[in-house]
Image: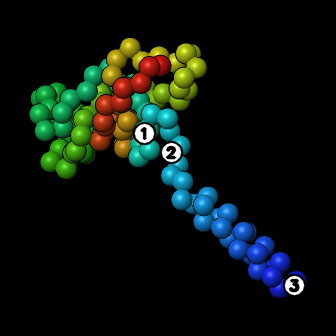
């Protein structure tokens, strides 16, 4: 009888882990899971950049031919969502590369959220 109780306990114990891993998780309510949420004053299509943006990217050492998505200009991070304290009056985007201190953000996709 003890072995059946132990077997049932083990079955239920492992079944709990299996069911817990089957539920997909999204850490961001905006869907921005591959980068960081940014508020950019403007965005440009990476395949149709202005001369000024092309020049700036060249000075930063970014290879323009490798860019995918939008390029965000003068961006600031958005860290608080849904509290009403943070707002973006320009374009809200999710960017994969924000290593240029807000000057340029690369690999951006537009996000439609109410902040």
Image check: 28 left or right of 57? right
Question: Which residue was labeled with disc 1?
Answer: 32
Q: CA distance from mark 2 to mark 3?
A: 43 Å
Q: In the rendered structure, which disc, 3 or 1, sits on the residue that comes first in sequence? A: 3
Question: Which residue was labeled with disc 3?
Answer: 1
Q: Nearer the viewer, residue 73 or 14?
A: 14
Is 75 placed above or below 21 here? above
Q: In front of the other: label 1 or label 2? A: 2
* Residue 66 coordinates in the image, percent (x, y): 19, 50
Image check: 56 left or right of 99? left
As helix, strand or loop, the secondary structure at mark 3 comes to loop
Is 42 placed above or below 106 here? above
Answer few, some or many: residues within 10 Å of disc 1's Cα (few below 14, many 20 plus, some between 14 and 19): some
| Residue 48 seen in render | yes
* Residue 74 coordinates in the image, percent (x, y): 34, 24
* Residue 57 coordinates in the image, percent (x, y): 23, 38
Q: CA distance from mark 3 to mark 1?
A: 52 Å
Q: In front of the other: label 3 or label 1? A: 3
Q: CA distance from mark 1 to mark 2?
A: 9 Å
Query: Dots 2 and 3: beta carbons under 8 Å?
Result: no
Which residue appears at 13% of the width and 39% of the height? 47
Which residue appears at 41% of the width and 24% of the height? 113
* Residue 36 coordinates in the image, percent (x, y): 44, 38
Question: Which residue was labeled with disc 2?
Answer: 26
């Amino acid at each position: 009888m003890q072995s059946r109780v132990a077997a049932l306990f083990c079955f239920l114990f492992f079944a709990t882990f299996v069911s817990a891993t089957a539920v997909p998780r999204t850490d961001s309510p905006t869907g921005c899971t591959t980068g960081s949420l940014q508020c950019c004053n403007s965005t440009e299509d990476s395949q149709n950049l202005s001369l000024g943006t092309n020049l700036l990217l060249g000075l930063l050492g970014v290879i323009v031919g490798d860019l995918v998505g939008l390029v965000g200009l003068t961006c600031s991070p958005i860290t608080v969502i849904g509290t009403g304290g943070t707002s973006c009056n320009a374009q809200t985007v999710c960017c994969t590369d924000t290593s240029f201190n807000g000057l340029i953000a690369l690999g951006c996709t537009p996000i439609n959220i109410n902040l």
